[in-house]
Image (cartoon, rainbow, N blue to C red):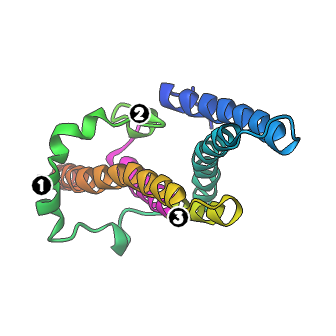
Amino acid sequence: MAKTKKSGPAIFMYCVIALTLIIAAICFVLYYGDFSEGTAVLWTGIVAFTIMYHLWVRLIFGNINKLFNINYKQWWFRERAFEKGIYKALKVRKWKDKALTYNPELFSLKDRSLSDIANTMAKVEVDHWTNVLISLSTLLFAVIWGQFWLFFISAVAAILFDMQFIVIQRYNRPRVLKLLSRQKNMTDRR
């Protein structure tokens, strides 16, 4: 399989991980190495570390999820009756195209079949549900550094960030499946 070129959002994510890792390391060395006693240095390091953790762990679990056979036909991915009302209330149609896509090539109708895209959408949904669970793990940092509410806010912000992608996949997948069904019906008629 040919290696794909990294998208802008992917490159940005890697750069943020590298930058926040460096900032966290410098701040922790300054604070814990007794070069600085300021809590601002410690909390700058903690914030940088938390951002790095959120992004880095998402990359790791995204790669782990590739090991599992995820298929859009599985029961979890079926559209539920209540979802259309939620999507309408959230006005998903207006903002869904503005969200960043880590790897836009995976959704290219030019290069991939509708079935492949539907499976990719299911896989992306699983990735983001995994990220929601990962976001809760940052609450454990409160055991080390205290300030539970700061880590709670971080976890909620990360969960809301990932929920937008879950909503987008669940909103778009039935439309892709409808196209896939039409395509199959046209093929069957021939």
Alpha carbon distance from label 3 to label 1? 26 Å
Span of residues in magenta:
112-132
The tag earlier along the polypeptide, 3 or 1, is: 1
Q: Which residue is mark 2?
A: 111
Rendered residue at 44%/39% (across/down): 106
Q: Which residue is mark 3?
A: 136
In the displayed structure, would residue 147 be above or below residue 40?
below
Question: Image quadrant for the N terminus?
Answer: top right
- Which residue type does callout 3 highlight? Leu
User: Is 109 left or right of 102, judged from the image as shown?
Assistant: left
Helix, strand or loop at mark 2: loop
User: Is 181 left or right of 139, judged from the image as shown?
Assistant: left
Judge depth for marks 2 and 3 and give the one in front. 3
- Which residue type does callout 2 highlight? Asp
The quarter of the picture where residue 73 lies is: bottom left
Toward the bottom, the furthest residue is: 75
